[in-house]
Image (spheres, coloured by chain):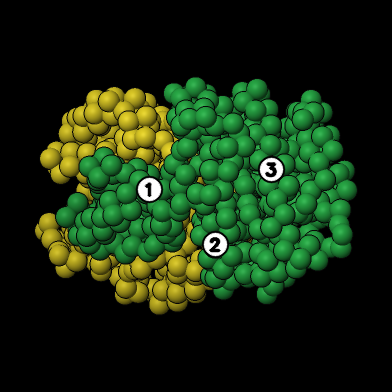
Chain colours: A green, B yellow
Amino acid sequence: MSTAASLASFDRMWADLGPVGRVASGGYRRFVWTREDAALREWFAGEAAARGLDLVEDRVGNQWAWWWDGPGTVDDAVRAGHTGVAIGSHLDSVPDGGAFDGPLGVVSSFAAVDALRASGVVPGRPIAVTHFIDEEGARFGIACAGSRVLTGALDADRARALTDGDGVTYADAFAAAGRDPQALGRDEETLARVGCFVELHVEQGRALVDLGAPVAVASDIWPHGRWRFDFPGEANHAGTTRLEDRKDAMLGYADLVLAARAGAAERGCVATVGKVAVTPGGINAIPSHVTGWLDTRGTDEGQVRALVDDLETRVQQHGATVTRESWTPTTRFDTDLADRLRRVLGSTDELSVPVLGTGAGHDAGILSGAGIPTAMLFVRNPTGISHNPVEHAETQDCHAGVEALAACLTDLVADQP
Amino acid sequence: MSTAASLASFDRMWADLGPVGRVASGGYRRFVWTREDAALREWFAGEAAARGLDLVEDRVGNQWAWWWDGPGTVDDAVRAGHTGVAIGSHLDSVPDGGAFDGPLGVVSSFAAVDALRASGVVPGRPIAVTHFIDEEGARFGIACAGSRVLTGALDADRARALTDGDGVTYADAFAAAGRDPQALGRDEETLARVGCFVELHVEQGRALVDLGAPVAVASDIWPHGRWRFDFPGEANHAGTTRLEDRKDAMLGYADLVLAARAGAAERGCVATVGKVAVTPGGINAIPSHVTGWLDTRGTDEGQVRALVDDLETRVQQHGATVTRESWTPTTRFDTDLADRLRRVLGSTDELSVPVLGTGAGHDAGILSGAGIPTAMLFVRNPTGISHNPVEHAETQDCHAGVEALAACLTDLVADQP
């Protein structure tokens, strides 16, 4: 396969995306339905147009750039049994996130299309490059919101009612971006087109460094969830209120933070309290309300659930209420598809193309949960650091990712089901 | 003294101020150099104008409404040895603060002027009703900023460089409000006019309830200060980063919150962590930086200092840096002035006009620290709750406060030094 052109295309796209939503920290703030998000959508539309791909936006706002030279339309092909092969990822970021988490998969997908074309591949099935919106959930608090609403894993009414830190509802943000909030919901038409999905993503750990391999295939996503803990207190003067007369909501919150960490260590999970909101939030006012968000995951679903149960019991002494905002059980990716990709990638043993589980949620996990055969490729991360401005992948590893994705795609579209 | 008219005037002013800066919680958000602040300043100017008082703004933006019928100007009177008697307080609030903390003193001061006029008092010294700006420091983090800059207790360069939560400097906010930031600084001309200061304030505790008295005279303000604790961490993915690889800034913060409370209990002080800022602040990102603000006070200066020392030592294990943002030692109000006011108020023993210390800082404390004879009157608070939308004082106690302040003022302006 001729890949030089596709790798040059990768480098050009990567350079184009670099400045979009970049902030002083050197990281990114790319949140759904913002000006930065609009710039990313326009970039995606431009790349689709430059390749003559047919751009379709689903009911949720996810973008699909279709390559199908016929006969007939994509839907004709689907009806004839030739369902589409979707490849892609997301473009949004956590606050001050890195450049690779998400965009690497989208850019690599366009570059893979270029590679197939340079090689003269004539796809036997439609191909879509996909941009899932709002994967990080940084603005409205629900991760993978784009794929969740698409598949019905997140109810449209619940999505519309989500609010951001300024009190703006998802429905209002969606309407302000020129979309119809009433159209939000599971999109059968789109889902029917997708025969399988492959998401390439930067690794968010150091396993590939230790294994000495540039690319891995995913086995599963750990069970993971988010819980909101609300601690009540009573606002009062920080100087004049005796300790014994106080109801200070911050104390229960601090207890949660330390108990979550200790419990996670005990149960072999990970737990993070990365976001907190304090009312009224004045230096000289006793907090009347503190909300903390717990993110916890682990290889063992029972241990993750037990950790949260422990914490729920513990915070009762502080009068706290606990709300589950999301929960995703263990997601096992399609074994046949994973084995096929590993064969395509020339795996001779476990080590040449490693198989990795991950603690990170992904749109691929949501699609897999909706019954779509799904796989993931991970690209080596030299430090393992992610969700941080210094997140990085070496260019040669990114290029290896493009080549791996192109090889997998070539194999999948040769398939005549 | 005829007070019916002045009490009606109090009620009218109280009703006029009610809606300004009120928020959904039922409390107030009145922060310096905002639209709400401008409305409060305009209200003050209107009340001054309605009484024919001479409105002067000092270099800092504090408002002074002078009543002096001559001979000569206020400054002529001062040069002749008849320094002014200032009465007043502040109009700003903590986030979601109550209606009484601050405004009760300003409204009572105008009503006291009305009472003197209704009684035909001809002042032998100039009288000023004073509105100190930014007492709570809710926007820029330094309490009593108006009186501190006025007296030089806060350096003008330091004041100009303060930033609010949006990164706006005090200098820029001051300029945007139409003032010259270069004019900020100790205002000798204003200070020279003030012979003594009396601040009436709602009590921020329950001592007067227990003592069965509507009004007290202050003895002292406890030593108090604010410290900023900065905890370093490393942003990383909340799902994929092993516990042992993490540098989670939230853990040190939580340890501070619990240690501050335990240490305060041990040392007989109070300590509060009411404000926190987290970077990046995403649910699925390990915090790379957490800043917490500690407010601590107590009757014993040594114990307060020792508590902060203990905490500074403790947070070294988390790599934290500690910055003192403000510190005010014990402030003892002028004993002669306090005794005089208690005699005026008909004190026959300790209980009829109680003498109270307080853990709250006040502009009166700053003026006292600058060598101006200063006193405070406290008005009973039935619940003791303050810095909270439900903060309250009964109307009859407010009226008793106006009468007490008018009586004190009458006595003070009869004085011919």
Q: Are marks 1 and 2 on the same chain?
A: yes
Corner quadrant of residue A326: bottom left
Which circle's residue, 1 or 3, is located before the other in the chain?
1
Asked if residue B201 lies left or right of residue A206, the reply is left
The x, y position of residue A390, in whole percent, is 55, 27
Give the image location of residue A410, x and y in percent: 72, 41
Q: Where the C terminus of chain B falls, by quadrant?
A: top left
Q: Which residue is mark 1?
A: A297
Instruction: Tell me which chain the residue with mark 1 is part of.
Output: A
Please identify the quarter of the rendering in which residue B82 is found: top left
Q: Nearer the viewer, residue B301 or B90?
A: B301
Amino acid type at circle 1 is Arg
Report crowding for label 1: few under 14, some 14 to 19, many 20 or more residues within 10 A (C-alpha).
many
Residue A205 vertical position relative to residue B382 in the rendered view, above or below: above
Residue holding disc 3: A411
Label 1 in the same subunit as label 3: yes
